[in-house]
Image (cartoon, rainbow, N blue to C red):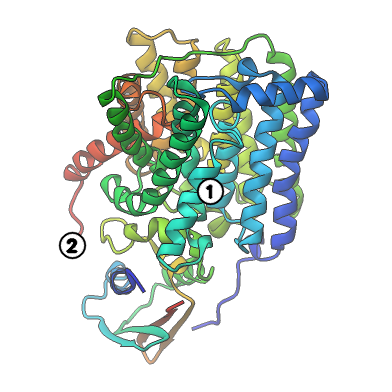
Amino acid sequence: MKGERDKILKIMNELVCFFFTLGISDPHIDIKKTETSTTILVEAAYKDPDHKKIDRFQELIQNGRQEDLEEYYWNLAGNSQYPEFILLGTLIDSANISYENQILRIEVTRKHN
Amino acid sequence: MKPFKPNPSMDCRIISEKVKFRIILSYPLFFLLCAFIFNTPIEIVNGLRKIILSPSILISDYMAVGNVGSAFVNSSLLMLLAILIAYQNKSHMTGSLIAAIFTVGGFSFFGKNIYNIISIILGVYLHSRIQKEKFSKYLLIAFFGTSLGPLVSQISFGLGLTPVLGILFGNIAGIIAGLILPALAGHFVKFHQGFSLYNIGFVSGMVGTFFMSIIRAFGKNNEKALIVSVGNNLEFSIILGLCFVSFLILGFVYNNKSFRNYIRLFRHSGRLIEDFVLMDGFAITLINMGTLGLISTAFMLLISGELNGPIIGGILTVVGFGAFGKHPKNIIPVMAGVFLGAYFQVWDITSTPVLITVLYSTTLAPIAGKFGWKAGLLAGFLHITIVMNIGDLHGGMNLYNNGFAGGLVAGTLVPIFESFRKEEI
C-alpha cells in the first residue's frame, strides 16, 4: 500500500520519542513486517518508572485506528519536537504495554488494509 | 503494570456512536425548522435557486443573495449530507468530524451550496478509487475541501460563459481540485507543523491561486464581492443562544451532571491533531463547544457587530473546532491580537471582513496554546495584515482565506519561536 513504509517509520519514531521523553536513551527496536501487518516492538531497561506518563501514553494510543484522520494528518507524526501520541494511536490497530522486571515493553501492530 | 482501564471521566467510551450522531444531527434539523420562522416554503425554494446560481465569491452572504430561510435550509442540507456520508462510511463521531460538519454548515451561510460542493467531493472520491483506498480515509479532506465551492460556482455562473460551457468547466475544475487536494493536504500540513487548524484553507488558497492565475491568463477576472445582510441580531442571537446553551446542558448531563474536568481541557495546546473527543470525551467537548459559541457570539454583539451569514459561519466554525483544538484559553489571545491589529491599522473594526477575521483567526489558536498568550497576540496582529492582502491571489474562490493566511503566518512564526526555545537533550 502506498506510503505504508513511511507510516511505519513514523510510528517507530513516535515510539522511540516516547522512550526519550521518559529519559530512556537506549531503546531496542524490533520490526516485523508481513503481508498483512507490521508489528513494532520497542523495549528498554527502565528503573523508577513514571507511571503517570505511561498511563497517559496508554490512554492516548488506545483509541484505536481512525482512518479518516490517518490520511490527512499522518505526515505530522514522527517529529521529535512535537510528539503526537494521539496521532500514533490513530495509526495503529492494537497496542500492548507492559512493565515487568524493570523492562518497559511497547508492542504495536498496524494492519495493512 | 496495571491493566488499562478507561478513565471514567472519558465518557467518549461510554456514549455510543449512535447517540453522538443523533446529538450532532439535531443541530441541522433545528436549523431546518428555524428556516420557516423567516420565510415561507415558496420563498425558501426561490432563495435556494438564487443561492445555487450565485457565483458565491467571498464574501457573498446567502441571507442577502437568497433570503434568511433559504440560507438556513442550505446550511442544514449540507450538514445533513456530511453526516449521512460519514454515517454511511462508518466513521466515528470524532472531534475532527464534528469540526468538519460544523465548518461545512457554517460556510453554507456564505459560499457553499449543494451544487458547488458535489464535484469537489466527487474529485476526492475519484482520488480514493485511483489509490484503491477506502473513501472513508479521505472524508475530512472531502468535507474541508469544499472550501473551493466558489471556484465551481464562479466558473459556472460568474465568468460570462454560456450555461453549458460554464457548468461543464466549473464542474471539471471542481473535480480536478478534489483530485489533487488529498496529495497536497498531507504535504502542506508539514509547512506549519499543525499550528494552523484550517490546513485545507492553506492548501485551497494555493489551488485557488493557480486556478485564478489560469482564469486571468485567459483575460477573465473575478469582481470583488461584499454582499452582507443586516438587521437580524435579535433573532439570530436567540437561535445561536439556544444552540450553545443546549451544548452546555447536554455536556453537563453526559458529564455526570457536572462541569468537572472542563478546565483540564485548557492544558491542550490545540495543535493538530488534538482531538478533544478522543482525548477528553464527548461530554467535555460539548461543554467546550457551547462555551466557545457563547463567547464568540457575545464578543460580536459586544462590539456592535452585525450577525449575518458570514459571522454565523465564523461562529459555527469556532464551535466546530471546539472539538478539535480550540478552547477559550488558546483563542482569546489570537482574537485580541486581531482586534488590536484592526484598531491600530486602517481597517474598520466593526466591518464584516474584520469581524470574520477575528473569528477565523482562531485557526492560529495552537500558537497561543503552545508558545503562550504573547505569541498568540502577535500571531493575531500579523494575521489580520496578511489576511487582508491575500484574498486577491485566489480572487475570493477559496472560502478559507483565513486558513490560507493562517498557514503562512504559522509556517513563518513557528520556526522563529522554536529557534528561541531551549533545545531539549
Chain under callout 2: B
At a point 45% along the width and 10% down the height, the residue shown is B349
Of residues B140 and B306, the one drawn nearer to the viewer in this rendering: B140
- Cα distance in 3D space between marks 1 and 2: 28 Å
Q: Is B66 above or below relative to B346? A: below
Residue at the (61%, 22%) spot, across then down: B62
Relative to B174, residue A104 above or below? below
Eyeballing the image, is B295 above or below B2?
A: above
**Label 1 environment density (alpha carbons within 10 Å; few <14, some 14–19, many ≥20):** many
Q: Which mark is residue B265?
A: 1
Q: Tell if the residue under mark 1 belongs to the same chain as the one under mark 2.
A: yes
Q: Secondary structure at mark 1?
A: helix
Residue B246 relative to residue B213: left or right: right
Secondary structure of residue under mark 2: loop
Give the residue type at disc 1: Leu
Chain letter for mark 1, please: B
Q: Nearer the viewer, residue B77 or B287?
A: B77
Three-letter residue code for mark 2: Ile
Can residue B291 be seen from the camera position used here?
A: yes
Instruction: Answer left or right for B183 relative to A26.
Output: right
Q: Nearer the viewer, residue A106 or B318?
A: B318
Q: Quadrant of residue A13?
A: bottom left
Q: Which residue is mark 2?
A: B425
On-image quarter of the C terminus of chain B: bottom left
